[in-house]
Image: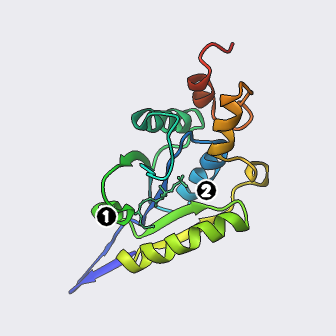
């Protein structure tokens, strides 16, 4: 983005935010994060408290697990992982100068759920939402499915990064 003041033009970095509960981060999330990291100068992966959901993994651990998972997948460089627990999501965007929110959409249901939030976030602060499609092999993966499979003793390794699988089941070889 080129910002001009008088005779001077400065290229400002394009900053985007990938928000979510990430309870836990899945391979689908990682896929979307990696795609978004290639599109923007700086990408903030933001763990946001969702009051509508009862969490499995403590807030701080979710941040650590995303950092560890990105390191394992060698997705780093322009990616920052942090959290936001008070106030609007767009307040964080304003604070860090982000103009775009990234949401992964797996199908029509996600789009229906995300559309009103995208419009409200644009109304509130002019922040646009960009929807990205995950790779088809991740299209059925969700954090809630992982939580359910895990709570019933199933193997979640096909759906989550290694760091998450080890966190959820430290005793598994
Ligand atoms: O992974 P999730 O639970 O689907 O993520 C939902 C999340 C955290 C992105 C959503 O709940 C959210 O945007 N929360 C921030 C609260 C906010 O700013 N609300 C007003 C505009 S929608």
- Is residue 66 found left or right of 137 in the rendered image? left
Q: Are marks 2 and 1 in contact (CB under 8 Å)?
A: no
Q: Is mark 1 within 8 Å of ligand 1?
A: yes
Label 2 – label 1 distance at C-alpha: 24 Å
Q: Position of residue 52 (x, y in %)?
A: 49, 53
Q: Residues within 10 Å of mark 1 (few under 14, many from 20)?
A: some
Q: Which residue is mark 2?
A: 35
Q: In the drawing, what numbered circle is on residue 91?
A: 1
Q: In the image, 120: left or right of 2?
A: right
Q: Residues within 10 Å of mark 2 (few under 14, many from 20)?
A: some
Quarter of the figure with residue 15: bottom left
The quadrant the N terminus occupies is bottom left
Give the number of the mark in front: 2 or 1.
1
The spot of residue 108 in percent (x, y) is 72, 68
Q: Is residue 39 visible?
A: no
Of callouts 2 and 1, which one flags the residue occurring earlier in the amino acid sequence?
A: 2
Residue 159 to residue 137: above or below: above
> 76 above or below 169?
below
Residue drawn where x is 61% and y is 48% of the image: 29
Quarter in which the C terminus is drawn: top right
What residue is shown at x 49% (from left), y 77% (from top)? Answer: 119
Q: Secondary structure at mark 1?
A: helix
Residue 173, placed above or below residue 112: above
**Residue 22, x across and y down, in percent:** 53, 45
Colour pattern: rainbow
Dot 2: what SS?
Answer: helix
Q: At which x and y percent is residue 94?
A: 31, 66
Q: How many marks?
A: 2
Camera-nearest residue between 145 and 9? 145
């Amino acid at each position: 983005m080129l910002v001009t003041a008088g005779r001077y033009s400065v290229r400002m970095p394009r900053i985007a935010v990938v928000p979510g509960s990430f309870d836990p981060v899945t391979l689908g999330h990682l896929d979307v994060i990696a795609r978004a990291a290639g599109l923007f100068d700086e990408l903030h992966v933001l763990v946001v408290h969702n009051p509508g959901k009862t969490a499995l993994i403590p807030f701080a651990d979710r941040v650590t697990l995303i950092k560890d998972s990105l390191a394992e997948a060698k997705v780093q460089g322009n990616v920052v992982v942090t959290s936001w627990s008070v106030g609007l999501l767009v307040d964080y965007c304003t604070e860090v100068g982000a103009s775009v929110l990234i949401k992964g959409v797996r199908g029509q249901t996600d789009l229906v759920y995300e559309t009103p939030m995208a419009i409200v976030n644009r109304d509130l602060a002019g922040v646009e939402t960009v929807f990205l499609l995950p790779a088809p092999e991740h299209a059925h993966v969700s954090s809630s499915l992982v939580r359910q499979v895990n709570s019933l003793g199933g193997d979640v390794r096909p759906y989550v990064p290694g760091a998450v699988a080890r966190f959820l089941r430290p005793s598994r070889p």
